[in-house]
Amino acid sequence: MSQVYFENIRRETIQKESKTAESQGSFKLLKFFIVIAFIVLTIQLIWFLGITPFRPFSRIEISGSSLYDNESLLSYAGITSESSFILTNAHTVEEMISSLPLIESVRVTKRFPGSLEINLLGRRAAAVAFANRGGLTIPVVFDRQGVIFQIGTEDMRGYMPDLPVISGIMIEQPVLGMSMPARIFPLLESLDIIRINSPELLSAVSEIRIDRTTSDGIELTLFLIHHRIKVLLTGINEDILRYTLLMADVLSERDPDIALIDFRGAVASYYPQTPGGWF
């Protein structure tokens, strides 16, 4: 009886030792995997935080409208094949690109750990004027902010047919980036909106002469393409221009001798051609 009892105790002891050994083996294996995982994670963090930001950008994305090709734009901004997240100052890049005459605004964003995004808004032509440079009369194109960004004829073949000519202002020795007088900014903003929404209206106008500026606005003379009629206005917008062209059509059919329409007062007035010529 006692022999059987001790045999049972010995068997239970062996089973407990076996289970303990198995548990210790599983624990050691788990510790091994934890250590390996920690080492791998540490290496990845070191690579991600300590190495990748110093490596050249893996992605450079340029979006928006611009007349510059990407290579020239990056070169001017100082972005090379060696530029990285850490070594690139987004604000400095913005300032350099913003100084280009064809760029209205730019936003530069760095994405950790190795991406660069450049979003551009190119200047959009609002009107053209003629300037004096070196004794020659040359055309200049400016945008809604009054910034000259095209000078001469070679770079303006795509602009001239679609833009109204602004006259009545003196522009001497124009250079790229030069700003037009602030008094015509509201006019340029209006022309930009009209060109976006109703370009066919501007195509009926050959010239907009600035006669004078007042505390109430700006007095203009419009010269139309399809009529020998001049129109006097105080400011311009899409509705005013549409109504002006409609009145010019109606009055020219009613009386071919109509030479001038004056919208500056509360009531529109129109006048025939004088014997001495046009108003």
Image (cartoon, rainbow, N blue to C red):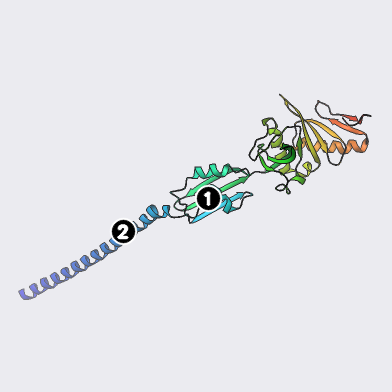
Which of the marked residues, 2 or 1, is nearer the chain's N terminus?
Answer: 2
Q: Which residue is rendered at x = 85% and y = 31% of the image?
A: 261
Q: Quadrant of residue 55?
A: bottom left
Give the image location of residue 177, x and y in percent.
Answer: 63, 39
User: Looking at the image, do the residues carrying marks 2 and 1 touch, with CB atoms under 8 Å apart?
Assistant: no
Q: Amino acid at mark 2?
A: Phe
Q: Which residue is rendered at x = 14% and y = 71% of the image?
A: 14
Residue 38's disc number: 2
Relative to the observer, which residue lies in front, 44 or 105? 105
Q: Which residue is mark 1?
A: 117
Q: Residue furthest top?
A: 215
- Can residue 22 be seen here? yes
Residue 204's disc number: none
Above or below — where is 11 with respect to 245?
below
Q: Quadrant of residue 98?
A: top right
Q: Quadrant of residue 184?
A: top right
**Relative horizontal placement of residue 49, taking residue 182 as reference (left or right):** left
Is label 1 in a helix, a strand or a loop?
Answer: strand
**Relative horizontal placement of residue 108, taking residue 65 as reference (left or right):** left
Q: Which residue is rendered at x = 89% and y = 35% of the image?
A: 251
Is label 2 in a helix, a strand or a loop?
Answer: helix
Give the image location of residue 25, x and y in percent.
Answer: 22, 67
Above or below — where is 13 with respect to 109?
below
